Amino acid sequence: MGKTVIRWKLNEIMAQKRVRNKDLAQGIGVTETSVYRLRKTDEMPRMTPERLNDICKFLNCQPGDLLVFIPDSEGDETMSEAREHSTESNQVSNTGSFMQRLPGKQKSDEQLHQEAA
């Protein structure tokens, strides 16, 4: 049976939204050190549903925006490989969203995936 990797993307989401540790800490009622620790880990940290709710409310995002599920069939995928896989997936989906907003420039998911490869 393979290993499953769930990658935590709080650092990426905070960077995209230009939110500082201090701002999130004040917004959810924790210390900046706690936010720093949450932000710097790649693996899903243990937290209460209330804490996840507070983070999502403050960042105006869904829990799924903070997580990436990457099943590993061989059981030997490392976190760096998981990050690489996640980044490639995000590039394809971000390109797709951008292309869908441009009239006359729409591409299928298959075309976007081929370009990303």
Image (cartoon, rainbow, N blue to C red):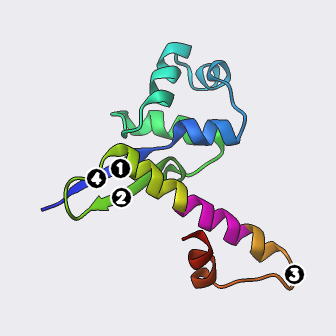
Element on which disc 2 rests: strand
Residue type, numbered disc 2: Ile
- Based on the picture, tell me whether residue 91 belongs to the magenta stretch: yes
Residue at 52% x, 23% y is 35
Do labels 1 and 3 touch, CB within 8 Å?
no
Mark 1–mark 3 Cα distance, whole angstroms, equals 36 Å
Which contiguous range is marked in magenta? 89-97
Q: Earlier in the sequence, mark 1 or mark 3?
A: 1
Of residues 25 and 77, the one drawn nearer to the viewer in this rendering: 77
Residue type, numbered disc 1: Ile
From the image, state whether disc 2 or disc 4 is nearer to you.
4
Mark 3–mark 2 Cα distance, whole angstroms, equals 33 Å
Please give the residue where the numbered disc 4 appears in the rendered image.
Answer: 77
Q: Where is residue 108 drawn, in percent x and y?
A: 65, 85
Please give the residue where the numbered disc 2 appears in the rendered image.
Answer: 70
Please give the residue where the numbered disc 1 appears in the rendered image.
Answer: 6
Q: Where is residue 81 drawn, in percent x and y?
A: 38, 51
Mark 2–mark 1 Cα distance, whole angstroms, equals 6 Å
Please give the residue where the numbered disc 3 appears in the rendered image.
Answer: 103
Q: Is residue 111 visible?
A: yes
Q: Where is residue 74 drawn, in percent x and y?
A: 20, 62
Element on which disc 3 rests: loop
